[in-house]
Image (spheres, rainbow, N blue to C red):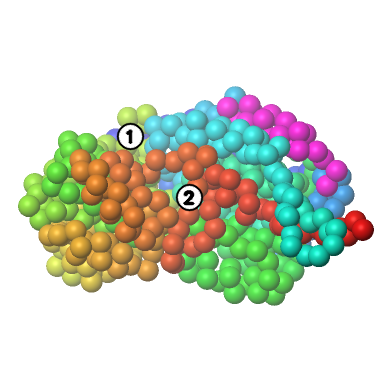
Amino acid sequence: MAVSQAIPITRHPFANGSYKQMLIDGTWVDAASGKRFETRNPATGELLATVAEGDKEDIDRAVAAARRAFEGPWSKVKPFERQNLLLKLADLVEKNFDELSQLDTLDMGAPVSRTRAYRLRAVGMLRYYAGQTTAIHGETVENSLPGEIFSYTLKEPVGVVGAIIPWNGPLTATIWKIGPAIATGCTVVLKPAEEAPLTSLRIAELAMEAGVPPGVINVVPGYGETAGAALASHHDVDKVAFTGSHVTGQSIIRASAGNLKRVSLELGGKSPDIVFADADLDAAVPGAAMAVFANSGQICSAGTRLFVEQSIYEEFVGRVAEFGKKLQVGNGLDPNVQIGPLVSEQQLERVTGYLDIGQKEGARALAGGGRVTEGALAKGFFVSPTVFAGVQDNMRIAQEEIFGPVISAIAFKDMDELVKRANATTFGLGSGLWTRDVSKAHAVAKSLRAGSVWVNCYQAMDPAVPFGGYKMSGYGRESGKQHVEEYLNVKAVWIKTA
């Protein structure tokens, strides 16, 4: 493992130690309580900003603003105008993309080499939703009732959306929530993660610059147990769109019962990534490694259960371990860094706890296995890329989501046994397989119980292709036409003409 020492922070206006307010009804305001919280660079511990800490009263204000906008001026805005707003916002995101990617790096630690690579995805999502804005339509339906009765359907915005996002990709997560809302004519109250709220606040600023009317987008930073819980249970919120842990997702479902609000959930994962002996191993080694090590393993769909065919197990897992040892760990602002810090001390404790559990359970750490404390990196929350060999299906490191750069390598012998074991998880978000055999690829892809199956690649994403989970990984889809449908109601209209 190569280690990059910490480098001086480039001071961004949203990360210069100053105070940041919340956005409600087009105005930057303090929290009603006056409370604030700090957000710090996880690579250095340095203070980036203090942020207004929202709670129930602020959520009430934001939801009221969103309701006024939804039932007032925003309801009269035509699809072409909403499309134009999204295109303007896309242009502004593209123009300011370097600073947005830097904000993500500063606030949650992802290497800037990674965050800069999201330009096409971030801008592409906004332009995709802009295209969908004018493609929303109902249909005429020929019914079988006697007489002359005409029937048709309308697609209408669901209303006020409460959006709650995680910290592991603030820029794209923010766009994933506000894009379809604007496209369909909904309004939004966004609660960013307290660990990384700055990019969401900057996106809100750009949305106002694009001309998005007051109250259409509101951003209330705060903690999950206060602001997030208030948003999930609010009786004037029509839908909650949440990305995060399955435990919080379950809480949101319970909170939604009060007014039976619509809920879409993208939750955790313990995804299988399968390597057959006939695979192109030169491609599969880096592919399988970065299916976990990218973003320091802080990706819900990371391929953390690495199933390798028995005949190549020792060779392949050894090569993945060697690959991990060569990755450069350090401050994400260094363009040469490939592995940044974990987002917080709490996450560091969680991941290192699982490293201890894995070794106690009998797994062998072929690479990594601990915290990085060399030089200035001791001030940050760094864990070296870890490869555990000799992992058994019943080990906790093979069953529980770690959300860190930790691979659990598991051997298998035949395909029937493999599919059963790969599906033996409570989650079902992502999955991957590596093979040259097309028939095998189709057969396994069909058999895996997961929302995405990547063949000879991993984590490929596109705005037009739906993404979401099976089982405890949630329900509903983001991206694609299915995503837009999540923000729409269908109304049936019957007219007796004679």
Q: Is residue 70 left or right of residue 193?
A: right
Is 441 in front, or is 251?
A: 441
Question: Which label is found at residue 337?
Answer: 1
Q: Quadrant of residue 354?
A: bottom left
C-alpha separation, residue under disc 2 versus residue under disc 1: 28 Å
Q: Is residue 215 left or right of residue 164?
A: right
Q: Give the structural element (helix, strand or loop) at label 1.
A: loop
- Please, is residue 460 above or below residue 386 in the view? above
Question: Which label is found at residue 363?
Answer: none
Q: Residue at x 43, y 47 (%)?
A: 42
x, y percentage for residue 488? 69, 53
Q: Nearer the viewer, mark 2 or mark 1?
A: 2
- Please, is residue 25 above or below residue 244 in the view? above
Outermost residue toward the right in this view: 498
Whether residue 70 appears in this view of the structure is yes
Outermost residue toward the front in this view: 146
Question: Magenta residues, as a range?
Answer: 75-94
Quadrant for the N terminus in the image: top left
Magenta stretch contains residue 347: no
Quadrant for the C terminus in the image: bottom right
The amino acid type, in three-letter code, at marker 2 is Phe
- Please, is residue 267 above or below residue 480 in the view? below
Question: Which label is found at residue 467?
Answer: 2
Q: Residue at x 44, y 67 (%)?
A: 472
x, y percentage for residue 201? 64, 43
Q: Residue at x 83, y 47 (%)?
A: 75
x, y percentage for residue 457? 31, 40
Q: Residue at x 67, y 57 (%)?
A: 162
Magenta stretch contains residue 77: yes
- Category of crowding for the residue at label 1, using alpha-carbon neighbours closer than 10 angstroms: few (below 14), some (14–19), many (at least 20): many
